[in-house]
Image (cartoon, rainbow, N blue to C red):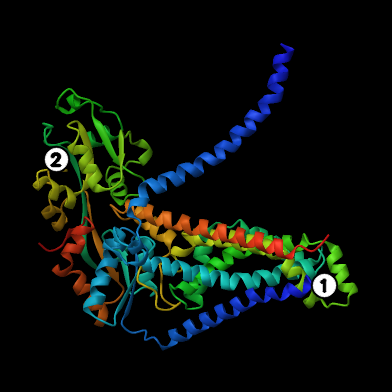
Amino acid sequence: MSKISKMPTSRGPATVFLSCLLCVSALLGQVSAEAKEGKLVITGSSTMAPLVSEMGKRFESLHPGTRIDVQTGGSSRGIADAVNGLADIGMASRALKPQEKDLYGWVIAHDGITIILHKDNPIQTLTDDQIKDIYTGIITNWKTVGGLDAPITVVNKAEGRSTLELFLHYFTLSNRDIHAHVVIGDNEQGIKTVAGNPHAIGYVSIGTAQYDATHGIPIRLLPLQHIPATIETVRKGIFPLSRPLTLVTKFPPTGLLETFIDFAQSNQVNDLILKQYFVPIHE
Amino acid sequence: MLRQSRHVQEYGPTAIIWAAATMVVVPFFWLMGDLLWNGWNHLSLSFLFSAPQNAGREGGIGPILMSTLLVVGVCMGVAVPIGLGTALFLSEYTRQDHALGRLIRASLDVLAGVPSIVFGLFGNALFCQALGLGFSILSGGLTLACMVLPILIRTVEESFRAISRDQRLSAAALGLSTPTTIRTILLPAAIPGLLVGGILGLGRAIAETAALIFTSGYVDRMPESLMDSGRTLAVHIYDLAMNVAGGNPNAYATALVLVGLLLIINLSSSWITTRWTSFNQLPA
């Protein structure tokens, strides 16, 4: 009996529960008071989400009382959410397709990737087919494409990187076809790998590559289809291996929506775009 | 020759069992070593409390830690009462072959095997859209609760069933009602099982990515209410590792925090269990 009389300790958890529930209801009560105005929901491309999040934070600090909520899920989801009204703005890391022409697209930045070689490598240009053959292991020596007699070191991106997707899509390859000697994660790592190996070939974001090449890192950016790989050609949308980062709305934007899209397209966010290794639309 | 085969018969299985056990331990130490090696340097008190900057490459995980605790809090706050009630219903109020009981058990077993991304899409459709909660900590917590309930209920039910029938008979003989028996005898005796169920659920909840990315969302601002969207630790790790170039160091540090949190929860629960059982062991 004396043991059983100790049992009331089991009230402990019950008390904790009650207080938890009280907290929850208190927090919920707070919600209804909150104004829904001044809030934008943006969903879509996971490539764009980190950039647009940063833009949102700067926008919030410039316009007190506004809230920019960014969610991910992929470009198709972004467009679907913008169409059915779940989101105010969708994010798509591609141009709008012909069947999406009734939507409004607002390009805020570009993402371009380029093939890089070591500066000491005499090769000045490669055709798309040669690049494809190098990455699939058909060409294994620089001599075959008119270079030195040296084995090619193929540098590939790790699974899940958007640059990898873009690269594979452009050359119509699957990641399994690629015979890589080095697998790298981010752009900087790719540039360091190629800069440290005169016989390596790799691909990275143009923004980072051009910055490093002009700051003394021994790499060369190869043209694609005779179009030079520069921030300028990517900005103009003529570089083949690039894509526009697009905000999508269902209606012509007004009010806060318009203010935010104007802000995202202004040169006030250039530093944020460069920090995410994309190409701004302004100089 | 005979001696040798005897030798093999005796020591062979022993060696295999030792090897199997070692192989289980190696990945654990490998993983922990990798996390510590890559993440320890980036860990500091300010990392735990400051807000992420530059898409999480810089700054800390303060708001993310807070969102995680809130999401898990909502999840457990909803799942534990419902789970406990259902477990009591299954073990104390129905016979094992009761039709409704069997239906509940069967549906729980199916739910336990559903991939978490399905729970995520379900939560998005039900809580975020149909119930209008939007991307919010509340939606995330409720989705997780749905996901955690099956495992919680089955563990708790088992711990009630493990209590000897004699105790229930003695209580009945003393004229105690079922609710009183539950409150004074069964609940205290089942506490270790409750904790194990809770920990299993909590562990699944805190490490969840797929169910949360479409429900509690991606926003890394400090949450002001349960209706705010909030990014959890696992989602943050996923984003840093997959979407943010140069995010790896902070992804490692965040993973270290997540594993540390799980370790603390596990250790404290096993400590509570030992304390509890040493207090409440009824004399044989």
Q: Dot 2 corresponds to which residue? A: A219
Instruction: Point out the image quarter for the N terminus of chain B.
Output: top right
* x 65%, y 62%: residue: B275
In the rendered image, residue B85, in percent from the top left (x then y), is placed at: 69, 72
Answer with mark 1 or mark 2, whichever residue precedes in sequence.
1
Q: Secondary structure at mark 2?
A: strand
In the drawing, does residue A208 fall left or right of residue B253? Answer: left
- The 10 Å Cα crowd at callout 2, few under 14, some 14 to 19, many 20 or more, is many
Picture quadrant where residue A62 is located: bottom left
Task: Judge whether B168 appears above or below B16 on screen.
Answer: below
Q: Amino acid at mark 2?
A: Ile
Side (left or right) of B68 relative to B54: right
Q: Residue at x 78, y 70 (%)?
A: A3
Q: Residues within 10 Å of mark 1 (few under 14, many from 20)?
A: few
Q: Secondary structure at mark 1?
A: loop
Q: Chain of mark 2?
A: A
Outermost residue toward the top in this view: B1
Q: Chain of mark 1?
A: A
Q: Nearer the viewer, residue A223 or B77?
A: B77
Q: What is the number of the mark on residue B239?
A: none
| 1 or 2: mark nearer the eye | 1
Q: Is residue A190 left or right of residue B82?
A: left
Task: Judge whether B239 appears above or below A197 on screen.
Answer: below
Instruction: Name, please, the residue furthest toward the bottom.
Output: A33
Q: Position of residue B216 (x, y in %)?
A: 44, 69
C-alpha gap between disc 1 and disc 2: 83 Å
Residue at which label 1 appears: A1
Q: Is residue A112 above or below residue B197?
A: above
Is B87 in front, or is A167? Answer: B87
